[in-house]
Image (spheres, helix red, strand yellow):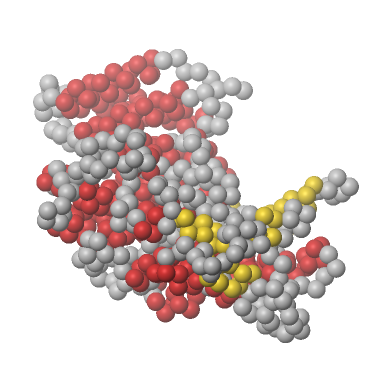
Amino acid sequence: GYFLTEIKNFSSDDPRDNIERLIYRWRLEKKDPTAPLSPPIKPIVFWIENTTPHRYRDAVQKGILGWNRAFEKAGFSNAVEARIMPDDADWDPADVRYSVVRWITSSQSYIAGIGPARVNPLTGEILDADVLIEGETIRSMRRFYLDRLVEETGDKHAAGDACAYQTFKMQEAAAALDAMTTMGLIGPDEVPEEFLSQYIFGLVSHEVGHVLGLRHNFKGSTIRTLKELHDKKLAEEEGLIGSVMEYDPVNIAPPGTTQGYYCTPIVGPYDLWAIEYGYKPITADSPAGELPELRKIASRSGEPKLAYGTDEDAEESEGERWPVDPYCVRYDQSSDPIGYAEQQIKLSLSLIPKIPEKLAKEGENYTAVRNAFANLLGTYISNAASATKFVGGQRLSRSHHGDPGAAAPFTPVPLAEQQRALDLVAEYGLSDKHLRFDPNLMNLLAPSRWSRWHDESPRPIDFPFHEIVTSMHRNILDALYHPSTLERIADIESKTPEGTPSMTIHYLFSFLRSRIWSELAENRVAAISPIRRNLQKAHLRKLIEVMLSTGAALPEDARTLAWKELTMLQTTIGDAIKRVERPDGPVAIHLQSAAALIAKALDAQMQMPPQ
């Protein structure tokens, strides 16, 4: 996956495509064209800006030079050099003659990385490119927490060539350090040198990968099993992940497991393959003449460790749900993302009760306690919601017909795996039994009272716990009832061999009703917590939205089944009202309100979608 320059050839009569595409890459030529491994005539030189703190320079340098492992696969030795900008340099870091890894600082560390910059549009040759490293993404790890956790419960990412890896990596690092502190592995103000150097290596190698021409690869995290994640020998030989172009989470070992690498120590097998494709010298008279050898290299795409998926495969924008592959996701890990999500959820739940003991310091305020709670709760929420991507999901393959080991372009996720995902979502994302934290802890979640001159946006003084959980519920329901999800479920039947069970809209709707309204099955309806009442109302509104929708993309079966679900709930709620323990209590009032809402919706005139 490379960035491309595209030229439309108006003189071409090719009936399939008249666009000529050239990848972004540096000009590399062997000093000895006959040698299998040769240094280049002119290496790719990155200067480390002299503003970079001395403490971090070695790790930055390793992140740059780590790419030489990949260039050796393409036949080049020492293709990439990392030099320190002299303090008395007579040139400016913005000078286009120098490619610089720059160290910058800002009041808010929410910048994005920089991809390939100045490129010859006729050839794709990279002429100059810089990398920006935001110093605050490293220095403020222990100060960071999800100020806007409500927004973070969604999966919104900017499109295009921008790279938000640094920002998301900082969030991951903050949560990981809080986890390590509550596990008693480090002190509340400590950032281990080993952790820091691995973090910087991953950050720099990712951004340098962009300026070598590479795009993101969000399938890079799928090459390891859960058991292999902390195998140091395996990570040293082949990498913790398949590609440093992933958005990979910090790798924290659960209790009882010896800690492996926090971040990958080397570029992965996909990176070696991609650099070979882009930089291996091929004797040819024209770019078209290189195609046979390039196709031979690319034909390996069916190998599991070379799996590739990029931004358009993982992108979600406001109100849209285009991605179909649940294995092409940011910040997942392992070949079993559902198992990894459950592992992270359980780890967070085990650590949250320990926060006051490990992070409340004598004579100081409770900011660190609030930050740690927010970070660990954020880990819980993001992992609980992530499994929704498996429902209606399909594995994507970019392999071409005839490639060895190639899968079909689309392979539906097996029903058992979709059901497993729904079970996880129901257990942790829709139930509140794991979200009943010690009131003493909840009363410690005080914010810092220092003003922030760079950010005057209002923030709640008390921690908005119910709002955050309600937002999680809304995001989960939005994902599962999204027209794209329901349309894919309807389509999966035609993609599944006869006799093989598949997910259905009926199963999904019935499953959600039984889990969300489970309290009504009791002989005596005694209690429904406020969190669950909010969820139940959100569920009703979503069913009503589906039933009354006029969107052409929504399957007609979904509207019909939403109507059926509402009529069944109307009967169930009406019966439950008679069995409520306190007829004048909040549970009874909630159920009466729900019944009235359903009745009003069913009385509404159903509109036919446009033809």
- Compared with residue 404, is residue 22 higher up or lower down, i.e. above or below? above
Q: Depth check: give the residue in front, 506 or 19.
A: 19
State the residue at coordinates (23%, 21%).
592
Left or right: 567 in relation to 2: left
Q: Is residue 468 visible?
A: yes
- Compared with residue 164, is residue 476 higher up or lower down, i.e. above or below? above
- Compared with residue 547, is residue 531 higher up or lower down, i.e. above or below? below
Quarter location, residue 213: bottom right
Left or right: 258 in relation to 75: left
Q: Quadrant location of the C terminus?
A: top right
State the residue at coordinates (48%, 68%).
60
Left or right: 8 in relation to 172: right
State the residue at coordinates (33%, 21%).
598
State the residue at coordinates (25%, 21%).
593
Q: Depth check: give the residue in front, 546 or 5.
A: 5
Q: Is residue 513 visible?
A: no
Q: Depth check: give the residue in front, 50 or 288.
A: 50
How many numbered tags mark residues here? 0
The location of residue 293, given as percent across then percent down, is 75, 70
Quarter location, residue 153: top left
Q: Depth check: give the residue in front, 315 or 521.
A: 315
The location of residue 331, given as percent across then percent down, is 43, 56
Q: Quadrant location of the N terminus?
A: bottom right
The location of residue 437, given as percent across then percent down, is 17, 47
The location of residue 296, given as percent across then percent down, is 72, 69
